Image (spheres, rainbow, N blue to C red):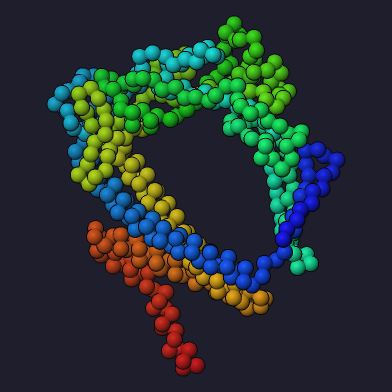
Amino acid sequence: MSSAQTFSGKNPNKHTRVSVKANPGFLERLSESAGGTFVGIILFFLSLYVLFTNEGRALQTTSSLNEGLSKVVSLGSFSNFDPQNNNHLVHLFAQLKTAEPLHDPNYKVVVQAVKLKRQVEMYQWVEHQESKDYQEGGETKTETTYTYNTEWKSELINSRNFDKEIGHQNPSAMAVESVTVVAPEVRVGPFVLSKGLVEQINNFQTLSLKDFPAANLEPFLSIDDDYFYHTEHPRRPEVGDVRVRFSFAGLSDETAHLGPPQTVSIVAMQRGVQLGPFKTKSGDTLEILYLGELTAEEVFAKEHQYNSMKTWGLRAAGWVLMFLSIQLIMRIIYTLVDWVPLLRELVSVGLKLFALCVSCSLSLLTIAAGWLFYRPLVAAALAALALVPVFLARSRLPAKKNE
């Protein structure tokens, strides 16, 4: 059984709701713990999958990058197309080129770039909530404070989901939609970039409206701080007002107020005048683009660095999943003794230490299994490290017996 009460003060944009729920009995808590055990088992096998496959992926990527570096043909800053490099992995750096500028006719914005993004925001009501639980009279009370503010948001907020919609209604749709326009063809020198390479050009910069000609403005528009405002009073917006900001990526023409064209470094397969994916013997695909002028060695060094960061990130994520899964699986033990305060605290600390030790050991063993087929000696070293807690625990048993 549960009930709720709402308390409102003088502020119409803030109120508090208190809900009351009877504390669950022993059987109910036991049932919840059993459900947590089931979830824990699923998370446990998921952590094993993440840890094991991550090692194979990391080694495969490393092998592919080493293969790519050994085969790449560096064109440098070239001027002519060489058909002898067809179906070979090539490296080059050059400035981006697009045939025609990108434009937005609604706002008369024109930019010679690879991508032009229109980001729309609307002034809307936003609900914030803060909850706290406390025990009173054998019941659990939850006090939730709801606060309503007006903010610029890029996503549409449905006010029907508010705890108190009256006085905080938002429009049901935006007058203008966000959109990103991409140039139909992007070149570097004589080569045309594949879709995969173009997707990697994401160095978006805000388009400055400082020198935007006032004659191009529609009557219902105003400019303030690089935004187009659909209102005459941008400093005093009302709910439903819209503002629009433009940004571009991959500048491809010399522009006085924007700067020179963007130089990119590419490692990809040359197929005619197309630059696209290169399939390695290890099974990975190499289709790499970086901003700036980089040598082939520098490009592959960055890829190795990214692979290392991704590997350690997934290792950490796998360990966290395993730690949480073991805690959930063992939660039922805590439930069995949670009616004894002192024992409850001791068991809680013990279960956390147990989950920490087991998750560390099992994570290392899983990583070692992933290395087994590629680096047997490394796998053996990791397995030995994983068994250290077990050996330490066994070495203390004779001492305790003698005592």
Res 332 → quadrant: bottom right
Res 399 → quadrant: bottom left
Residue at horizontal 50 percent and vertical 15 percent from the top: 104
Q: Position of residue 324 (x, y in %)?
A: 50, 62
Q: Is residue 66 visible?
A: no
User: In the displayed structure, would residue 327 be above or below residue 228?
Assistant: below
User: In the displayed structure, would residue 44 be above or below residue 203?
Assistant: below
User: In the displayed structure, would residue 380 be above or below residue 147?
Assistant: below
Quarter the N terminus occupies: bottom right
- In the picture, measured across the screen, residue 218 lies left or right of residue 270, that is right
User: Which of the pair 140/69 is nearer the observer?
Assistant: 140
Say how many tags the image has.
Answer: 0
Q: Position of residue 89 (x, y in %)?
A: 21, 34
In the displayed image of the protein, which residue is found farthest to the top?
215
Q: Position of residue 395 (x, y in %)?
A: 41, 83
- In the picture, measured across the screen, residue 82 lies left or right of residue 171, that is left
User: Which of the pair 10/227 is nearer the observer?
Assistant: 10
User: Which of the pair 119/68 is nearer the observer?
Assistant: 119
Q: Position of residue 29 (x, y in %)?
A: 61, 68
User: In the displayed structure, would residue 304 be above or below residue 169?
Assistant: below
In the displayed image of the protein, which residue is found farthest to the front?
1
Residue at horizontal 57 percent and vertical 8 percent from the top: 216
Q: Is residue 306 visible?
A: yes
- In the picture, measured across the screen, residue 64 lies left or right of residue 367, that is left
Residue at horizontal 53 percent and vertical 64 percent from the top: 35
Residue at horizontal 50 percent and vertical 66 percent from the top: 37
- In the picture, measured across the screen, residue 398 lies left or right of residue 68, that is right
